[in-house]
Image (cartoon, rainbow, N blue to C red):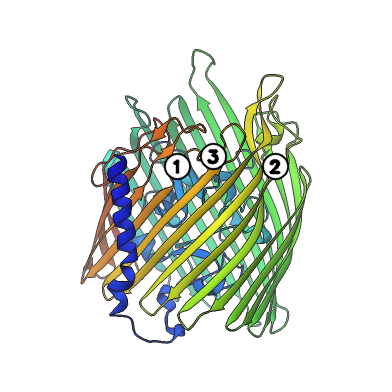
Amino acid sequence: MKTRTNASLGLAAFSLAALPLAVQAQTTTAEHDDTVALNPMVITATLAPRTADETLSSVTLLDEATLRRQDPVSISDLLRGQPGVDVNTRGSFGKESSVYLRGTGNESAVLMIDGIRLRSATAGGAAWHYLEPRMFERAEIVRGPRGSLYGADAVGGVIQLFTPEAEEGGPHPRISAGGGSFNTQRYSAGFSGSEGGTRYSFAGSHFSTDGTPVRRGGEDKGYDNTSALARVAHTFDGGGEVGVLALRARGSNEYDGGEMDFVQQVAGVYGELPVTESWRSRLTLSESRDELDNHAEATQWEPAGTSVIDTRTQTLRWQNTLSLGLHELVAGAEYSEDRVSGTTDFEVSSRDNAAVFAQGLVDLSPFALQAGLRYDDNEAYGDEVTGSLALGYDLDSFHTLRASYGTAFRAPTFNDLYWPVSGNPELNPETSETVEVGVRGQYQRWYWDLAAYQTDLDDMIAWAPTESGPWAPQNIAEARIRGIELSGGAELGEWALAAALTWIDPENRSEANAGNRIQRRASQSARLDLDRELGEWSLGGSWILQGHRYEDPANEDRIGGFGLVNLRAGWQFAPLWSARLTVENALDKEYETARDYLSSGRAAFVSVHFGQ
């Protein structure tokens, strides 16, 4: 198994390294400005629209075409194997998923939805498994620390999901229906348009499945999710703009030993005003909710019962953007409050955080400079200052060299600080320092990006036994994470290709496990996505490889690596009408990313779509 996995990863490395040779003959000497298709505009990296090479960051965009072609049943499936991204799942179809960016924990990856952060204030990380991919139009993955822009927890990076933009004219309806393996059913409908300066987008979806066993010999565990989206904005003649967004997902999820009812929700209202020709000011009021009702079955130790944990975060953010020719200054302030309620009696049920931030973007072609600074003052754990500095240099019209340094921190959660009996209110935040160097080649028909980095983490929060006996969270762990990421993409006529290779060394430096790999992290991964248009037909597939990982800190329980093949086909059989077939894990590979938690095996889905 080890030999086959290493050989497969080696083949993937060769395939990606050969990409420049495969497309060199079709690359023209077009100017750098003509590379828009493969040098997309992104927002998350700098809080301002910048092309991928201008961000001076390691960034991946998964655009609307990618999401529609792959039509994943979960956000986790979309993210697995992307550059610097590792996904850990405990079963399939709505079961718990963790997203590790550059070897950091799920609590150190920030999830944003249209600029609104969504997470559990008790568990710390986001519930990626409860988000319906059809509610989103694109995803931006920014790797590396972003504490100076986003505050707590942006240690490994930020993933932002964007809901669909309104189309011109309309209304334009969209309807889809389908199903497949494990009695899965999937429906969605929506419409969008614009008129007289007003843009609108509304959508709803429903997903249900009987599911598969979570563990060997177990029973099928079902999952259902009903999601709704409303987005409206209006632009006035003077250039001012107001808008509102609401996204809500609600459903139930069976697991070994019970069932969970969940709600994931973000809502926000904003106003933006052009103060002068070069100064725009934006005020946003938002709220996010993570709600969970756990209905546990009786065991030999505990009677049956229901526990409730609801977390709510309300945020007021004021952001100003000042454009000075080719240069830009972004500055603002943010106030947020976390609240926790439910059946668990936390000693403290709320905390607030006040922050100010600023970032300068300076273009001195061929040099570029980015510098950011943020100050956070939290009621629970004190104040933190984070900063970043990035330098870029255009070697020529096609190649950009970059180097950066950034700090970040992970905040202790309510569970860490106040869990009854075991909470530790004296905890300090985890802190990190990251150094990165990279180079990007950007051409008319293809691109490549190479990055190497090192992250040093101090005061990592780990649960460990105390002198009095019970386990409690403590600032005892340290880690050093080194990594290399190589990615590329091409659009050659009817072909679309994207490839990624990731090598990472997440070394545990705590006293008990010094030199071991941090548990549940794969040190090698690769992904290849290949699609082709054939008139009314389209064909494609994804090849995902993951190396082995360890279940335990002592690195004694080894979980083998695996390779997955996903296939897809589309048919435009009439104007505005199409059909789509996807086959996940086509080779029916049995694999694990957490010990004794099974994947679903081969799964096929077919759907019919109407609309643009």
Sequence-wise first label, 3 or 2: 2
**Disc 1 residue type?**
Asn
Which residue shows up at 32% across the image and 47% down it? 6
Tag in front: 3 or 1: 3
For disc 2, the marked residue is: 339
Could you tell me how far apart the alpha carbons at marks 3 and 2 are, in whole angstroms?
39 Å
Tag in front: 3 or 2: 3
Indicate whether 54 appears above or below 133.
below
For disc 1, the marked residue is: 88
Sequence-wise first label, 1 or 2: 1
For label 2, the SS is strand
Viewer-closest of 605 and 198: 605
Q: Locate residue 503, reporting x and y percent.
A: 44, 53
Sequence-wise first label, 3 or 1: 1
In the drawing, does residue 560 fall left or right of residue 124? left
Mark 2 closeness class: few <14, some 14–19, many ≥20 residues within 10 Å: some
For label 3, the SS is loop
